[in-house]
DNA sequence: TTAAAGGTTTACCGATCGGTTCACAATGTC
DNA sequence: GACATTGTGAACCGATCGGTAAACCTTTAA
């Protein structure tokens, strides 16, 4: 039972959903674009919603892995990684098929907080937030929670603005703002090497 | 020329589109929820897309008027108004029917930059940006363009984060960040009588 | 040899999609 | 009274929606 047609389906469905949206993408279109029969689809997923959730799960995994890895590649220190995030965002925005964030779009199409798709989108954002908070703590932030929330605002704002496309370097703008916010939250000499267990 | 059925239609369609999305809202549903006959709709608007564009036009007008007026009510000075924007956002987020920004959702459902709906959404954001840039200039910002772009990032990020709902005061977070960014961009003595906003 | 298991194709279902047609009723305004 | 404007209800269009049904093909493994 190695990675079969099921994973292939989810992978391809992910792209189509990202490009064209969820409601606008019919199952027939997925059949046409993936080459996988409708019968097979409905053997793996009982409803379209289940397929969407699987696609979002895969996207969350792929995106977070990519983001975190790139951040670590770019900078060794926690503070550097926080700043690196915006450089990575810039790389993302520059990709020709960039179309805003899949989870922002999903939460837009399924706006009720109780809806599974909305909830899963929120969870993705929450996971990134906690990662940033950990980095902020390691970077010696006075209030890691506040700093992480502020950086999240810049990140989400940069994504939306990049997609709306009336500013041409929203990642750069966010980076500049992030510098200011980090500096204002990190005590001068407390930077670097915050022991996991504080004194 | 008092409010005709046409305006009534656009007004009601606006609400339905905002709540349920664009693709997910069929014309039959609009007939049911607005009480206006399908025939009349298609006499005023030749396609669903034209109706959507009219609804977005109305939304842009209503929202910007409301935002700008509230900002002026809260604070007399340009700097105060910039900060007041985030207080106004907080009021917006607290409304029970808040469902993120209509234009972010629209650009998510119509992601191609050339699409009229996408373009009109971008224009709405651009208009707000220029307003903020004017205020930033009046507030004595060293680089009004940069400051306005940064504040826009906070604003869009706050909207998205408020809708995703894993942080409970994204407007407050944005306000705190905005203070830092404004202070770092406005020269010490160039500032004119800042009467800071409460909260 | 046999037989699931996983895949395919094709056709089909009722419902809804965006959009049209037609006959007709209420509303002025001259 | 005449006439256009603006609206109505209901039936209808072909296409597409999410989802099923039935028959067959192919691989894997007991």
Image (spheres, coloured by chain):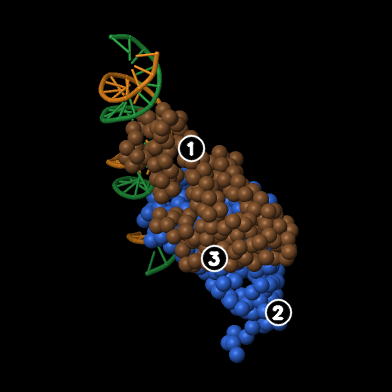
Chain colours: A blue, B brown, C orange, D green
Disc number at residue B54? 1
Disc number at residue B11? none
How far is disc 3 from disc 1 in space, using C-alphas? Answer: 37 Å
Q: Nearer the viewer, residue B65 or C15?
A: B65
Where does label 2 land, which residue? A188
Q: Position of residue A112 (x, y in %)?
A: 40, 57
Q: Position of residue A64 (x, y in %)?
A: 57, 66
Q: Residue at x 42, y 41 (%)?
A: B11
Displayed quadrant of residue D1: top left
What chain letter is assigned to the residue under label 3?
A: B
Where does label 3 land, which residue? B198
Q: Nearer the viewer, mark 3 or mark 1?
A: 3
Q: Position of residue B45 (x, y in %)?
A: 45, 31
In this image, A175 relative to A102: left or right?
right
Determine whether label 3 and label 2 are within 8 Å by CB: no
Q: Nearer the viewer, residue A8 or A113?
A: A113
Q: Residue at x 68, y 53 (%)?
A: B138
Q: Are marks 1 and 2 on the same chain?
A: no
* Quadrant position of the C terminus of chain A in the picture: bottom right
Q: Position of residue B75 (x, y in %)?
A: 57, 58
Q: Are marks 3 and 1 on the same chain?
A: yes
Q: Residue at x 41, y 34 (%)?
A: B3
Displayed quadrant of residue B38: top left
Residue A175's place in the image compared with B39, above or below, is below
How far is disc 3 from disc 2 in space, using C-alphas? Answer: 29 Å
What chain letter is assigned to the residue under label 1?
A: B
Q: Earlier in the sequence, mark 3 or mark 1?
A: 1
Displayed quadrant of residue D3: top left
Using the rendered image of the protein, determine whether residue B97 is visible from the camera's viewpoint: yes
How far is disc 1 from disc 2 in space, using C-alphas? Answer: 53 Å
Secondary structure under tag 1 reads: helix
């Amino acid at each position: 039972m190695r990675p079969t047609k099921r994973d292939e389906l989810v992978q391809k469905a992910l792209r189509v959903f990202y490009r064209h949206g969820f409601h606008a993408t019919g199952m027939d279109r997925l059949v046409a674009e993936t080459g996988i029969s409708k019968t097979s689809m409905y053997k793996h997923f009982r409803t379209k919603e289940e397929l969407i959730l699987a696609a979002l799960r895969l996207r969350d995994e792929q995106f977070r892995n990519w983001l975190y890895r790139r951040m670590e590649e770019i900078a060794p220190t926690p503070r550097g990684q926080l700043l690196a995030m915006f450089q990575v965002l810039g790389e993302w925005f520059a990709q020709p098929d960039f179309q805003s964030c899949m989870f922002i779009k999903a939460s837009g199409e399924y706006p009720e907080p109780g809806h599974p798709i909305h909830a899963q989108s929120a969870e993705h954002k929450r996971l990134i937030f906690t990662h940033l908070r950990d980095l902020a703590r390691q970077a010696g932030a006075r209030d890691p929670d506040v700093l992480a929330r502020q950086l999240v605002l810049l990140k989400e704002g940069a994504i939306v603005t990049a997609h709306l496309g009336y500013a041409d370097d929203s990642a750069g703008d966010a980076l500049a703002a992030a510098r200011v916010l980090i500096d204002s939250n990190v005590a001068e000499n407390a930077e670097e090497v915050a022991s996991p267990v504080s004194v």
